[in-house]
Amino acid sequence: MKYIDEYRDGRIAQTFARQIAGEVKAGASYRLIEFCGGHTHAISRFGIADLLPANVRMIHGPGCPVCVLPVGRIDMAIGLAIRPEVTLCTYGDLMRVPGSQGASLLKTKAAGADIRMVYSTLDAVRIAEAEPSREVVFFAIGFETTTPPTALAIRLAAAKGLKNFSVFCNHVLTPAAIQSILESPEVRTLGRVRVDGFIGPSHVSTIIGTQPYEFFAEEFGKPVVVTGFEPLDVLQAILMLVRQVNEGRHEVENQYVRAVTRDGNAIAKREVAEFFEPRKSFVWRGLGVVPYSGLRLKQAYAAFDAELRFELADAGGEDNPACECGAILRGVKTPTECKLFGKLCTPDTPMGSCMVSSEGACAAHWTYGRFRDRARSAA
Amino acid sequence: MNAILPDGMARVTLSGVSMEISIALVGDVGVGDYVIVHVGYALARIDPEEAERTLSLMREGGLIGPSEMMEALP
């Protein structure tokens, strides 16, 4: 497909790899964190780690929306779904995320709850319109890419006068999570990893632009390169980061100029600002409580807020104690350092969230990376 | 994009699959444009000139001549 195939050219990739190897300084180390789960997936799928010198290490960040949703919010969604009047609409990758005591939306659906997978928020609005006797709740999760679609669904439901549509809002903010990795005391006490540079997200940046990263580059002295999801994009971004580190620069650079501008998508930002406001704090799996990192519906749209409509209380909920998703999401541990990985925990029987979504570090390593481990141990 | 439909929708082909998506979040798009689609919404239009510039930089940086590059493409 155009704009994809040409960015996967293996010969250019090899040349980028030679350039990176030629420019890294012996004795220096380059620890680069890719924030976004889409990059985690691409790096595993295209074997990018194999093309890099030993002193360039890619650290998987927390930018997988399914992975960072805490157990308590899954439990709350299950609590909603088992109410007889409720139809819970959800993106498909949430279905298998483990809640407390091994519960999941998939098992809850099998037990008879009315849970429906949707592709788009518009599907949820259509269901509410077609079935006025049902209380249709959209389980909204994700970063800046999925928030504008939720905003438009509320706008549409309001225009249609739908009284049986609401949103269980779990939208989170990328800049808050990056800041948390860099400075939060919770993360510090739980163990933290040294970061020399950031690969900035692709799709998130089409919405928010490159401007929000300028604060991190300046305040924390870390270079940021926003890049696309194709392998040549990622390799070029790594080369750009290596050059910034070598030259002692910490700037925001945009490799993904074909889709990302400094200011982002004005329509999408306006829609989000109309319907949502920041929560004082939100809990992330792996990062703990992160101030001003989540969104909720504004007072003017409280009628569409499922948390108010169904008087939902925050549920605690604990991960499986042996699960290392928290440390993996902070880049402190790798998937193979988890006792459950590949044994009790596989994509068919996920014990932790990182094994559920294809963007999760564990699922990506299980699907692609473990074959590299095997080749290495055989060699 | 293959067709603009009523109510802010459009028909696109995604890896050979034809589907209806919302273009309410992107302003000025038309038939023939490439867009980034996420959960049924176009988030951004691909700028063809910037895309070509990135590719040329990659080819130059990659020290591969244009003729060699053509062979390398599928």
Image (cartoon, coloured by chain):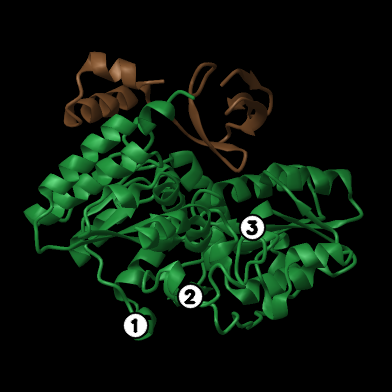
Chain colours: A green, B brown
Q: Is residue A24 above or below residue B72?
A: below
Looking at the picture, tell me which residue is in the foreground, A156 or A138.
Answer: A138
Dot 2: element = loop
Residue sitting at x 87%, y 43% = A130
Q: CA distance from mark 3 to mark 1?
A: 28 Å
Instruction: Count neighbours of disc 2 (C-alpha within 10 A) and say few if under 14, some if 14 to 19, many if 20 or more.
Output: some
Q: Name the chain under label 2.
A: A
Q: Nearer the viewer, mark 2 or mark 3?
A: 2
- Judge from the rendering whether residue A126 lies leftward or rightward of residue B19; answer left or right: right
Packing grade of label 1 (10 A; few <14, some 14-19, many >=20) is: few
Please give the residue where the numbered disc 1 appears in the rendered image.
Answer: A185
Residue A278 lies left or right of residue A121; in this view the side is: left
Please state if A104 lies on the left or on the right of A354 as rendered: right
Q: Residue at x 34, y 77 (%)?
A: A184
**Picture disc at residue A140:** 3
Q: Decide which of A367, A59 is in the foreground and name it.
A: A367
Residue wearing tag 2: A338
Which SS class for mark 3?
strand
Please tell me whether mark 2 or mark 1 is closer to you in this view. Answer: 2
Q: Quadrant of the C terminus of chain A?
A: bottom left
Towards the viewer: A154 or A50 = A50
Q: Secondary structure at mark 1?
A: helix
Question: Residue A346, located in which quarter of the rendered image?
Answer: bottom right
The relative height of residue A330 versus residue A22 in the rendered view (above or below) is: below
Amino acid type for the residue under numbered disc 1: Pro
Callouts 3 and 1 on one subunit:
yes
Q: Chain of mark 3?
A: A
